[in-house]
Amino acid sequence: MTAMTRPARPDEDDARLRPVPWRRMAGVTWRQHRIALAGVAVLLGALAVWLWSIGTPLHRAYAAAVACHPASSLACQNLVSTFNVSATNHAMGSKGPGGVLLQLLPALIGAFAGAPVLARELETGTFRYAWTQGFGRWRWALAKLVALAVVLAAATAAFGALVSWYYQPEFATGNQAPGLYQTSPLVTLFSLREVTFPAWTLAAFTIGVLAGMLIRRVVPAIVATLAVYAGLAFTAGAFLREHYLAPLVTASDNFNLPGAGTAWTISQWSTKDGRFAFAGGNPPLNLINQFCSSLPAAKAGPPGSFGQCLAQHGYTQWTSYQPASRFWPFQWIEGGWLLALSALLIAATIWLVHRRAA
Amino acid sequence: MNIVEASGLGKRYGRSWALRECTLAIPAGRVAALVGPNGAGKSTLLNLAVGLTAPSAGDVTVLGGRRAGSPAALDGIAFVAQDTPLYKNLSVADMIYITRSLNRRFDQPYARARLDELGIPLKRKAGKLSGGQQAQLALTLALARRPRLLVLDEPVAMLDPVARHDFMATVLAAASAGAVSVLLSSHVLTELERVADYLILLSRGQVRLAGAVDDLLATHGQASLEELALAYLRETQTSEVTR
């Protein structure tokens, strides 16, 4: 035990006490959370390979359909329908990323990476070790949370870029004329793109961290995180997103909007003589019977034919919509408020760590 | 210099006071034993001293007037909590790395040599070590920080007699080397007999007795620390009952 006998240190003055450098938390955070980070990497990596493997043939089919001349030839029509079938399958069916699986990603990553960060320390008692080291407890919490947040944001932003690449053919303008499948980038997987995916992941992560701090147990904190996240995501998708910018209004039905296939229709209504007549895209039955009974129901097929009939009787149909050109402003608006929310939640967590009586 | 100084210190959890009107001054260079029955407030007092808990009343300073929990206090105090919490899924080497990273000082050669002496392999996960080895690892990490005050909360409560003896031997070796004061809590009085030269007796959240062991034994006419503590604890218990 010769190592024990060492000359006593000179007394350190409080004022001259230099804090332990921030960068030392990098290695500490990595050692403590490498399993969670590896899990996220494996999950995103596997999904990236899958997206790439189904996205490459989709891009190839799209390129073939666009390059085909003359467009009206049977061969070209076949190429278009080949693309449309696989694009529709991908967007709606279980084979593609349009299903619920990808929508759950931010919640899963955030809950499983975020909730245990503090909950496990509190549950197992190791906070008594961590918070009595020289680094200082609020600095420890801040360094750890910021490091994890940055890594998660970088990984999910990269994955968001891949999602954007994958959907490129379906978001392309000018698909309408050749009859290629289209969808609005403001609707389809809007929350999994370059800005919104990291932003939602950070929100879920910080909700998880705070829930862990408050609940102090890992599993209940994960459950609470998923519940809160679900509420927030539903609220944003159903109520908030359409109001980010005032929708454009045009006097047409939603099939004849500028950029119809990629625009996001918010609402439709009709007026007569400058006064509100009815809401929605379909006229009420009594109006149809009154003015358009001469139109045989079977021939009412092409959408808008009732609209044309009513237009002759002085009705005007209106549509409010968000054009696809607003994709980036919407990305940054959603990313911005989610980032502000995440910063607020981290600040609240740090305050609790600083103040909390153990 | 007083290593821990408290005046009117109190801690309330909800309506009940875990610690009340605690005033004491523990001089540096001692091995101070905090003794009392379960629920007497020992852990509360230690948590206040290391800055894990904020007081509800009064105040506590450490290392000669530094606020408990302040950066300077954290720098100079090493704390081994009850049940010696360690990151169970990390290896011994990782625990050394983390402790070294989180502190301004860390005597890595000492930590390596000590663990080698104890036969604790660096690659083993902390959770796979025996209870005695886990306690020794936590103590080694604390001592390698070269603290001026080592605080131990019920360090031997979960250990078998051999591990208990070895643990106390390490504490005593560190204390007798002179650089570190020790404050430890325990309800195992026989273990304290050999090591403690300063005694704080707590019961029902209040300090009943505090002072150098030799002085206390002389004044109260008891032969051993154990008898002294028992006599006092019986007395306070009867007085609580008769009140």
Image (tube, coloured by chain):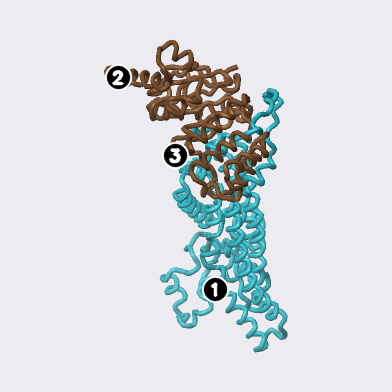
Chain colours: A cyan, B brown
Crowding around mark 2 (Cα neighbors within 10 Å: few <14, some 14 to 19, many 20+) is few
Amino acid at pointer 2: Thr
Residue B238 is marked as 2
Task: Indicate the quadrant containing the N terminus of chain A: top left, top right, bottom left or bottom right.
Answer: top right
* Subunit under mark 1: A
The image quarter in which residue B101 lies: top right
Asked if the residue under mark 1 is in contact with the one under mark 3, i.e. CB atoms within 8 Å, the reply is no
Residue under numbered circle 1: A95
How far is mark 3 from mark 1, CA to CA?
A: 59 Å
Pointers 3 and 1 within a single chain: no
Q: Earlier in the sequence, mark 3 or mark 2?
A: 3
Q: Which residue is more in the foreground, A237 or A340? A: A340
How far is mark 3 from mark 2, CA to CA?
A: 32 Å
Amino acid at pointer 1: Lys
**Camera sees residue B62:** yes
Residue farthest top in this picture:
B219
Q: Identify the residue at horizontal 60%, vertical 63% (top origin).
A: A250
Q: Which element type, helix, strand or loop, lies under badge 3?
A: loop
The image quarter in which residue A353 lies: top right
Crowding around mark 1 (Cα neighbors within 10 Å: few <14, some 14 to 19, many 20+) is few
Q: Which residue is more in the foreground, A32 or B25? A: B25
Q: Identify the residue at horizontal 48%, vertical 48% (top origin).
A: A218
Residue under numbered circle 3: B160
| Image x and y of residue B90, in percent | 57, 49
Vertical order, A115 against B212 (above or below): below
| Image x and y of residue A293, in percent | 44, 78
Amino acid at pointer 3: Asp
Please state which of the two labelled residues, at mark 2 or mark 1, is closer to the viewer: 2
Please state which of the two labelled residues, at mark 3 or mark 1, is closer to the viewer: 3
Pointers 2 and 1 within a single chain: no
